[in-house]
Amino acid sequence: MQLPSPHRNALRVGLLGFGVVGSGTHSVLTGNRATIAARAGRAIELAMIATRTPARAREAVSPEIEVLADARDLVQHPAVDVVVEAIGGTTAAREHVLAAIAHGKHVVTANKALLALHGDEIFGAARERGVSVHFEGAVAVSIPIVKALREGLAANEIEWLAGIVNGTSNYVLTEMRDRGRSYEEALADAQALGYAEADPALDVDGGDAAHKLALLAAIAFGGGPRLGDIHVEGVRHVQAADFKHAARLGYTIKLLAVARRSSRGLQLYVHPALIPSNALLAHVDGRMNAILVNGNASGVTMHYGAGAGSRETASAVVADLVDLARARDSGFPPCVPPLGFHEQTGAQRIAPMASLRLRHYLRISLATPSAAPEILRALAIHDIEVEKYTASASEAVLLTRPTEEGRMAAAVSALADLPSVRGVPARLRVEDLVA
Ligand code: HSE
């Protein structure tokens, strides 16, 4: 395929970082060069890379690509139109992104933590300077969910969205369920495969999913990223026994990120939940991600794809570069303010977590085999109706009817105090919206 000419109109890219995302971006940009140029209407050239390990990058890239050791030189370099931030973390990334914007560069990033924490500042600076910040790779990497919400579903009032948006924790849960592997083993694998964050606690404790939910909710519901409003629970406490009981009851367990309109405001939470085994999301396994979006005109749409990986993230990063390259021809300023961060003003009211009303799964270790009457009485005192109750000599497992969160928390404390109960019961919520 012939490259469009003239080449002097190429979009010139400066890449910050040469790790998982940076090297993937180089690989996709160079490997698919001709197709990308044809689609973008101009060449997209990787002009330079700044990395703390320049020798390694020099070995991996062609000599025309300049490799710098200092990101500060790249973000102000006149030969760079767009800065791709692929260094991760939030401190240096924030500094370099703000510097790039101040120097009039567009920015592409897959850094969800950066935008969830500093999105208002970064998008505000970009708006003032008249440049764009694109972030398709920040949520569920290869899935074009940012575009889907901003473009394909733009006509809708979004009722709710729910998704599996962390590849690492989904990989860990799948390995525990299907191969009986330990949590530790599965997590070590996910790290070796390059899925996990530098600090994997962000994956397994739900922080990474919360960062992505903050971005999704900002686009879908407006009001900016509200990380502090998200209730976050991770997967560390999910045990092999929970998968076994869930399967017997017709469920599987997934870490879900949920944003839902309710009469009390916007509900925002990340939690490991039981979902029906026949739900579409129940079949999203390993590092894969999927997001369901319920629009008031579209109905439910499902968006599925790889949730982690080097070239998978690069697919989204390069798509953002293609958007920028195309925008140059449109005659409009290329600034594409991210819908949700600025266009939709007015903060959303956030529903208190205590008002969430879902069904619950409880696994209770028993000190005495005949604990049922005591347990059922304690639940009844808290107005909790039980839908299913099964017990062996040492363990009771039950599903409740929909119960307010606050009431459930109080009931679990009461159960833990019963003489017939050992320790604190394990509790997981049941999500029916994904059925
Ligand atoms: N650590 C992230 C995940 C990478 O496992 O989903 C992609 O955001």
Image (tube, grey):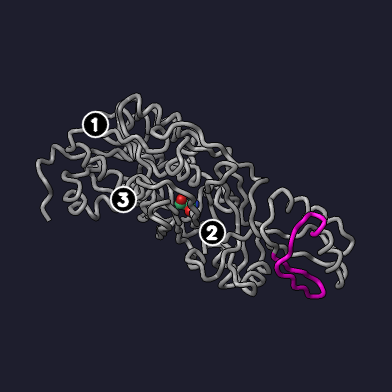
Mark 1 vs mark 3, CA separation in Å: 35 Å
10 Å crowding of disc 3: few (<14), some (14-19), many (20+): few
Q: Is residue 22 visible?
A: no
Q: In this orientation, does residue 258 appear?
A: yes
**For discs 2 and 3, the disc positioned in front in the rendered view:** 2
Residue 394 or residue 150, whichever sits in front: 150
Upstream in sequence: badge 1 or badge 3: 3
The residue located at (26%, 40%) in the rendering is 324
The verdict on residue 163 being magenta is no
Residue 92, compared with residue 389, is above or below; it is: above
Residue 92 percent coordinates (x, y): 46, 33
Can you say which quadrant of the picture contains the N terminus?
bottom left
393 to 336, vertically: above or below: below
Q: Name the residue beneath numbered marker 3.
A: 60
* Highlighted range, magenta: 380-399
Could you tell me the amino acid type at mark 3? Ala
Q: From mark 1 to mark 2, how far is it between C-alphas?
A: 41 Å
For marks 2 and 3 on the same chain, the one whose residue lies earlier in the sequence? 3
Judging by the rendered image, the residue that carries numbered circle 2 is: 433
User: Is 398 part of what is drawn in magenta?
Assistant: yes
Per the rendering, the mark at residue 333 is 1
Task: Name the secondary structure under disc 2.
Answer: loop
In the structure shown, which secondary structural element does the residue marked by tag 1 occupy? loop
Q: Is residue 8 left or right of residue 107?
A: left
Query: Hey, what amino acid is under mark 2?
Result: Leu
| Camera-nearest label, 1 or 2 | 2
Given the image, on which type of amino acid does mark 1 rest? Pro
- Ligand 1 under 8 Å from disc 3 Cβ: no
* Label 2 to label 3: alpha-carbon separation: 47 Å
Give coordinates of residue 300: x percent, y percent. 43, 58
